[in-house]
Image (cartoon, rainbow, N blue to C red):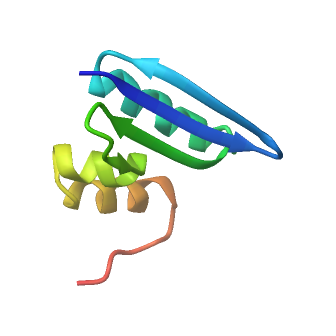
Amino acid sequence: MNFTVSARIAARRFAYQHASILTALDQGMSLIAAGMADVTITDGSGRTRSPASLYQSLFGGGRVDALQAEAIPGVMQAA
């Protein structure tokens, strides 16, 4: 299946093609970390998701919360 990673910075729009969902996810997360906006991943059937949403569907949502808490020192998770 083909995956298209799209992102925007200022008025420029970029699109990158990937054959693997994991490489598309990796690039999507990297583009967000680089400060790009409107980062989306579209699969071959036309379904568009954010990298965070795709990550949650692949690996579950609990890990994202744990990673965010580790990344921000002094932040505690709500019980």
Task: Specify the farthest residue to the front.
Answer: 45
Percent x, y for residue 48?
37, 48
Q: Is residue 29 above or below residue 38?
A: above
Q: Is residue 79 above or below residue 75?
A: below
In what quadrant of the picture does the C terminus appear? bottom left
Residue drawn 55% across and 45% down?
39
Residue drawn 51% across and 61% down?
73
Task: Specify the farthest residue to the top.
Answer: 19
Say left or right for 16 vs 1: right
| Tag count | 0
Percent x, y for residue 2?
31, 22
Q: Is residue 67 above or below residue 1?
A: below
Q: Is residue 17 above or below residue 67?
A: above
The quadrant where residue 61 appears:
bottom left
Residue drawn 33% across and 54% down?
53
Task: Specify the farthest residue to the right.
Answer: 11
Q: Looking at the picture, tell me which residue is in the foreground, 62 or 19.
A: 19
The quadrant where residue 11 appears:
top right
Residue drawn 33% across and 41% down?
46
The quadrant where residue 33 appears:
top right
In what quadrant of the picture does the N terminus appear? top left
